Amino acid sequence: MNTFYLAGRMLRTFLRLFLALHAVVGAFGSSTSAMQYHKREMGNGHFIIFMYGAIVPGDTRQLLKVINHTPSGDIFGFALHSPGGDIDEAYRLALYIRSVHGLTIIGDRNICAAACFLPFSVGRIKLVHPESKIIVHGTGSADGLDNVAALNATNKIAGYARKLGVPETIIRKMVMQAPGEVEPLSRADLVSMGAEFPADAGR
């Protein structure tokens, strides 16, 4: 089986994946609600784990319950759609996803913002739909003003990102971009961390 055949087969799998992501999005609530999980079989013995909603303490335990009895080698990847949430829990999710060598996926019109960026960043392969948005920013206080707690939270997420191998150019945006600014990462930013855009091939 030659390299070109394998590459074409993988690309077709990725394109089917993005079609599946588009079809499933409507079955979930808003990304701002509590995290919901769905395990979907992709037809080849492998599973995609859909993770939609805000990240809260205990989500890693909940994820392990959802994938109970599923061998790690059968998990194709993790599709994320989240506004962020608890930074420590996001880091725990990232460590787990990295431990099983899973892909991370941001599907059509999905958003991965703030703490959600940590689990996305560790994907063995990071698949991004061109119509998705991946956003990093600093942490602010409830009144919109910087305070010690908010600055500590910003430093914490930047420190975790550094441990996970995120490029320094993106970490600087994470630290410098104000919470009210929601400029998504550029394609160049995402490519710098190894993200791929397989849906482009279907255009």
Image (cartoon, helix red, strand yellow):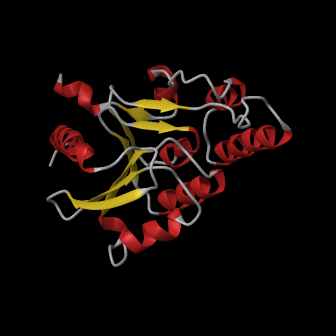
* Apparent side of residue 201 relative to residue 100 in the rendered image (left or right): left
Q: Which residue is located at x 50 percent, y 57 percent?
A: 98
* Apparent side of residue 180 relative to residue 141 in the rendered image (left or right): left
Q: Which residue is located at x 14 percent, y 49 percent?
A: 1
Percent position of residue 44, x then y: 16, 60
Residue 98 lies, with reference to residue 85, above or below; the image says: below
Q: Which residue is located at x 48 percent, y 45 percent?
A: 120
> How many circles with numbers are drawn on the protein?
0
Percent position of residue 87, x then y: 64, 50
Q: Report the quarter where the C terminus lies.
A: top left
* Apparent side of residue 84 relative to residue 150 in the rendered image (left or right): left
Percent position of residue 85, x then y: 58, 48
**Quarter of the view holding residue 43:** bottom left
Percent position of residue 11, x then y: 21, 38
Q: Which residue is located at x 53 percent, y 41 percent?
A: 117
Residue 168 lies, with reference to residue 79, above or below; the image says: above
Question: In this orientation, which residue lies closer to the viewer: 164 or 23?
Answer: 23
**Quarter of the view holding residue 19:** top left
Farthest-out residue, front: 143
